[in-house]
Amino acid sequence: MNLVSPLNQLEHAQLVRRLPEEEMAYIFKHALTQENARNSLLQKQRREIHLCVAHAYEQLYAENLDEHAALLAQHYAESGDDAKTREYLMRAGDVAARVNANVEAIAHYTRALDRAQRAGAHPQDLQLKLGRLYELSDQHDRALTLYAEMETRARECGDRAMELAALMARATIYSIPSKQSDRQLAQTLCDQALELARAIGDQPAEAKILWNLLLLNTRLRTNYRHAIGYGEQALAIARKLELREQIAYLLNDLSLPYAYAIDPERGIELNLQARQMWREMNIAPMIADNLSYAAMIYIALARYQDAIAAAEEAYALSLSIGNVWGQAFSQSWVGEAYRAIGHVAQAITSMEDAIRTAVSGFQAPLAFTRADLGALYGDLGMIARGIELAELAYRAGRNQAQVMVIWTAAQLGHLYLRDGQIARAATYIAEATETITPTDHESLFGAANILAEAELMLAQNDYPRAIAACDRFIEYKHSHRLRQDLPNALYIKGIALCKSGNTNEAMMILNAARVEAEDTNARWIWWRILAALAEMETDSTRARALRTHARAIIEYIADHTPQDLRASFLNVPDVKSVLK
């Protein structure tokens, strides 16, 4: 087709103009002219022109068609070629997904799926890709609807592979702390899927189901050793079959149970291996997820600055790609690190951010983080506000997972003790104690309840039991090489020893607490330890130095507390007694 003469005529009539920077490229001078010209063509002519344009693009850009996939899909759609339209919509979706442009990717995949279904096809890969993007965009309800439709169609046509894929996808969503989390349903789906995978000899599927069981036993339960068993089985299969992405998921999700239950250094090693793989594959949501896991591990080790750095990177990355789940996850635990080092304003900001963003996806902050925020407000002297938040957290936890009940009940116990309501505190702590499973004892959640029990025994003047509870907590931390809240337990034990008349042993324990607090920069408890030592110290010079140091830390904390809460903090009785 010779277009030179017609184009010259159009240019002479000032309907189009040539683009000097491109060879044989023209643009309409006015959009209305373009629209009128298009409308004047017969449908058959329009289709022929679009088909010619599509063919021209394929010839000109044969080496990098992916870059032009969206435009090619548009031209093939206008030409009436459904097969080519679906092909390029899929490619355009893949391109968008690779750069985390999830909205665009969902739009491309949705159009491709609509066209496929109109043609009577139900491509499994396309449905799984679209479902996964729904998950990454915190649209879990849409993902579940899609997977349920997949499963129904698979059973109708006897496609066992598609049925298995749908079962696995549903099980994953029910295994994680989202609005849809359901432990029993997740277990049922995993059992069905595992039986089906083994029946049809689908080893990649078997690895993924075992990974789901790993998630189920760590996200909504504390069966860490069982989880590691499932994860290692899955990892062996994935490595044998060279399933790179599955290996990355497994390393990522094995890092936390290893850190909490077996070996923290091994947990960090697995976390870093997974992160390197996610970076190589450029999967931004999983890089953020991995960094948030790292923050949790570092908090358990009382490496608070490392935790803050990881959480900040995870938050910035999640924000840049519009991943609300990642934003909530990154901020859900880091408030504990900020609080530990005395950065109260940042602790409150991160906790409130986590709670605000959790409403649309990742649900854990509505229980865990809200309870932590309540405890923080209580320690700042805003006890009524703290109890209100912790009660909300407790109710949210009861609707989701037992570990959330344990955590929130422990924080409520702490707050009611602060308020002098010992009987009410005892009720919550007893409920948590009665519902703890054997595996919960070997977890941070069980340890939190032990610390709450120690506080309760101290308030009830039951010093031997307070000391025994502290010893259990300290033994757990030492045996697992975890350090978070270790100075807190040593502090409570020291106070209990002092009140029971064992002053020398009390000072020895409190000095150990001081060393631990100083080494981990745990200012939030450090000043209390120094103040307690000052009260017991018989040498007036040393006592004065201890008290001066305690005051300096209190002033540091006050300087890093929001202005509207500073006066309340400085009026807390324990704080006032040091400052007077």
Image (tube, rainbow, N blue to C red):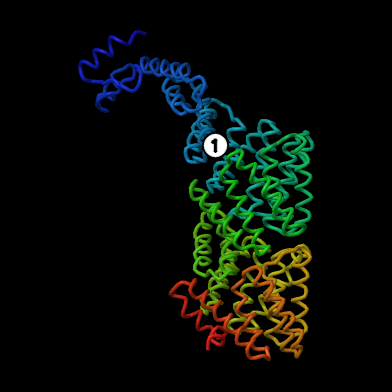
Residue at image location 56% in from the left, 88% down from the top? 577
Residue at image location 55% in from the left, 59% down from the top? 331
Q: Which residue is mark 1?
A: 98
Above-or-below relation of 558 to 182 = below
| 421 or 2: nearer the viewer | 2
Furthest residue in direction front, as rendered = 541
* Lateral position of residue 469 relative to residue 549, left or right: right
Residue at image location 53% in from the left, 64% down from the top? 351
* Lateral position of residue 449 relative to residue 38, left or right: right
Q: Quadrant of residue 60?
A: top left
* Lateral position of residue 381 relative to residue 476, left or right: left
Which element is circle 1 on?
A: helix
- Which quarter shows the N terminus? top left
Instruction: Count up the numbered dots.
Output: 1
Question: Which amino acid type is marked by label 1?
Answer: Arg
* Residue 487 appears in the rendering: yes
- Image coords of residue 369 (percent x, y): 57, 64
- Image coords of residue 383 (percent x, y): 54, 78
